[in-house]
Amino acid sequence: MTYTSLRNIFLASRPKTLPAIIVPVSAGCMIVWKYQDQIDVSINMLLAICTMVSAICIQIACNFFNDSIDSIKKADTAQRQGPRRITASGAMSARTVQLWGLGFLAIAALAALPLIEARGLIMLAIGIPSMFLAYGYTGGPWPLAYKGLGELFVLLFFGLVAVVGCLFVQVGWQPDYAMMYGAAVIIGLQCGLLSCLLIEINNIRDRKEDAQTGKTTLAVRIGDKRARGLAFAFIIAPYVILHQTDFFLPGMSMSAIWLAPILVALLIILRLRRCPANKRMNALLALASLHLVLFLAAISFS
């Protein structure tokens, strides 16, 4: 395999988007770490690594399918403002890109075997829908991204399912763990909302192109102004419910470490007000991804 082929595969995996799944899976493990002095629990590193590998591979598969299907549906045009797409640019065929997507799903399934062994067949209730929607996000008879449901999908699977699911893999369920699961729900909402910010900025940037190609994202449906208002809500809401995080998570406090995510959040809000819907929003996406990481770091170490 040539350097160019490897580079194309790397770009199609869209590594800059991976914090959207790395952060919530890390959050599930962080909750166990925070509670280990109060309850007889500890992080199982094998299950943590398998969960992370499986989740990352599912997201990479989703990115591959997204790349190929958008090209097949001609949703990627010469007017594209986002990063270069591998299929639309002709660097790889749609079939090859989709085969890579299937390959990553296979790796995700293999990595999930220890999770099924540890927690039983109930893990299939998480894994199968997640793997199916990696394709169904843009493909299939009812593609979520083309129906304006991308944000709902991200809130559920990159937020609640990822955090609560990771916690369940780590400790299972007992009534004594209710407070941990309360923390998982709140932090899952926060991670999901901040991941929704990523997709909203992406959809605001691509709104005109999507409208022309029939990709009716939520930004296309509600227009630029309301989509930006929704993006503001996605970044503000996690701070509004921060007092609930403090209630469920032991040892958390508002310390100086919160200055970093708050300053980045304010910078995103200011730039989002003025930034035109073009390539300049790619830098805003990078800031939103950084903010997601800083937000979890502040929860973890404050």
Image (cartoon, helix red, strand yellow):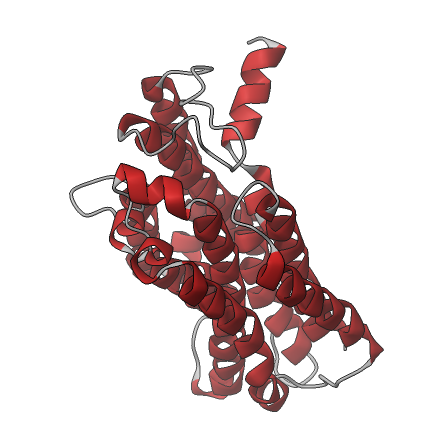
**Residue found farthest to the right:** 256
Q: In this view, does 89 lie to the left or right of 148?
A: right
| Residue occupying the point 56% across, 46% down | 18
Q: Which of 275 and 149 is in front in this view?
A: 275
Q: Is residue 283 visible?
A: yes
Res 251 quadrant in image: bottom right
| Residue occupying the point 46% across, 77% down | 185
Please state the total of marks drawn on the protein image: 0
| Residue occupying the point 51% across, 33% down | 13
Res 92 quadrant in image: top left
Q: Which of 25 and 282 is in front in this view?
A: 282
Residue 115: x and y in percent read: 44, 54
Q: In this view, does 213 lie to the left or right of 93?
A: left
| Residue occupying the point 58% across, 8% down | 2
Classify the position of the N terminus by image quarter: top right
Q: Is residue 252 left or right of residue 162?
A: right
**Residue found farthest to the left:** 141
Q: Is residue 168 visible?
A: no
Residue 178: x and y in percent read: 47, 86
Is residue 167 positioned above or below 281 on the image?
below
Residue 65: x and y in percent read: 36, 34
Q: Nearer the viewer, residue 77 or 288?
A: 77
Classify the position of the C terminus by image quarter: bottom right
Residue 166: x and y in percent read: 49, 62
Q: Is residue 260 left or right of residue 266?
A: right
